[in-house]
Image (tube, rainbow, N blue to C red):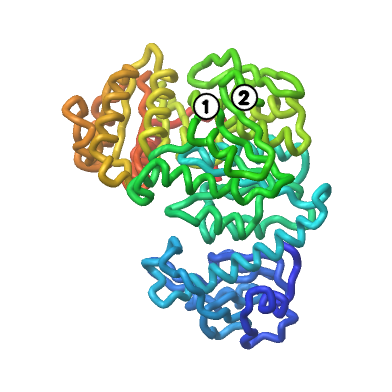
Amino acid sequence: MIAMTLAEVAAVTGGRLHRATGDEQVASVEFDSRKAAPGVLFLALPGERVDGHSFAAAAVASGAAGVLAAREVEAPSVVVPPAAGAAGTYLAENDPDGAGAAVLAALAKLARHSVDSLSVDSLEGLAVVGVTGSSGKTSTKDLLAAVLAPLGPTVAPPGSFNNELGHPWTALRADAGTRHLVLELSARGPGHIAALCRVAPPRIGVVLNVGRAHLGEFGSPEAIAQAKGELVEALPADGVAVLNADDAAVAAMASRTAARVVTVGRAAEAHVRAVDVTSDAGRARFRLVTPSGEADVALRLVGAHHVGNALSAAAAALELGATPAGVAESLSAAAPASRWRMEVADRADGVTVVNDAYNANPESMRAALAALADLGRGRRTWAVLGRMAELGDTAAAAHAEVAGAAVELGVGTLVAVGEPGYGPAARHVTDPAAALALLRAQVAPGDVVLVKASRAVGLDRVADALLDDVPRDDRQENELVSR
């Protein structure tokens, strides 16, 4: 973020100084008091078990310059006024008095002020790229960060920092030396993406797909498409909308933006496309074809669905000055960068574990099962699947659809963890512990095991336990980078 005094923070956020001179110097923000250090502005947010206001004094004692709070604390602080819309925030259940909403609203103002200050010069200033879609956002964000890094200092969120807290927190990691700010935008309802765009207005917007994630909250695929399209509606006339030509709902968003449209996909009419797509042990290879040239790409990420993610990252990077050859080199070198997303590791006995347990919806389930089938050619395969959340009235049909896809793709054994909707063909177990016991008893050297479900099911623990059962050969870790 740009350097500010606590008095300037108060002016930007509409807050008032408390127990502060106003001269305190702020250079970053943190919501974890354990990360308090000189120059940090500590965010006093309520949590499920504790309230950040209770840790304000401790944060300042650890070196923090001050606190952004919704009520007076025993520390130098900026106290911000109540904010409307507490029910719309991700922490609404833990924010009955709206204190968290007030701090988040102030944080959004602070991020917008910093981004605007860094984006004054459109040629040398900060270029903001937003990525959204029903699935693949985090992987695409990671790929985009990898291809932009050679062009200049790049900031991207760790993991899935994509909501009212993670989004402005990431935006405030950009400073005067940052050339590219890559942001992931999520939505749990209409207007959420538009609100995030107001925090850090993007110049390039990438829409990957429209699937059925959060269908229970949105009500229909059309409502999901409407929400995802808020990103392209926010783009300026001199901006660029990168749209997936292979997804009709995304391609239709071209009519909703004033920005120039660049399409990506395998379709012949796409501006940036993949041809001659093949697979090598589950990892896609293709020829990248662009208006400015062609180059060969060999992805290290497992799953054919990453072709579309890579094309989207390529198109955005090309708009920011990359060359096809440079993009291909960066894409081919990019390793997995966020945990529990097609995270592949081999045990010393030859068992391969694919941990894709961060989240799940019907489209990402099918993509993961297809990757399992590809990676497991000639080997026994296991799909350990749990519940897909937030599908509303379509849940039963969606789980049956995924079970059918497993059969269609030739998956050897489907293990359903606590979810009867996967049907009679699945082997049903009650919980992750039972799934682990079954796998320990029956998985043999050479088998491939996929674990996937919505995050709350906790199947990542099954994957971790399987890998801990037998020492891992570090040379076969697929060079996983975790953070």
The amino acid at mark 2 is Ala
- Which label sits on residue 270? 2
Measuring 68% from the left and 74% from the top, which residue is drawn there?
12
**Pointer 2 local density, CA inside 10 Å: few below 14, some 14–19, many at least 20:** some
Q: Would you say residue 392 is visible in this rendering? A: yes
Measuring 29% from the left and 35% from the top, which residue is drawn there?
398
Mark before the other along the chain sequence, 2 or 1: 1
Which quadrant does the N terminus fall into?
Answer: bottom right
Instruction: Quickly name the residue at label 1.
Output: 246
The kind of secondary structure element at disc 2 is loop
The kind of secondary structure element at disc 1 is loop
Residue 221 location, x and y as percent? 39, 41
Q: Is residue 452 left or right of residue 433?
A: right
Q: Is residue 345 left or right of residue 313?
A: left
Residue 161 location, x and y as percent? 53, 52
**Pointer 1 local density, CA inside 10 Å: few below 14, some 14–19, many at least 20:** some
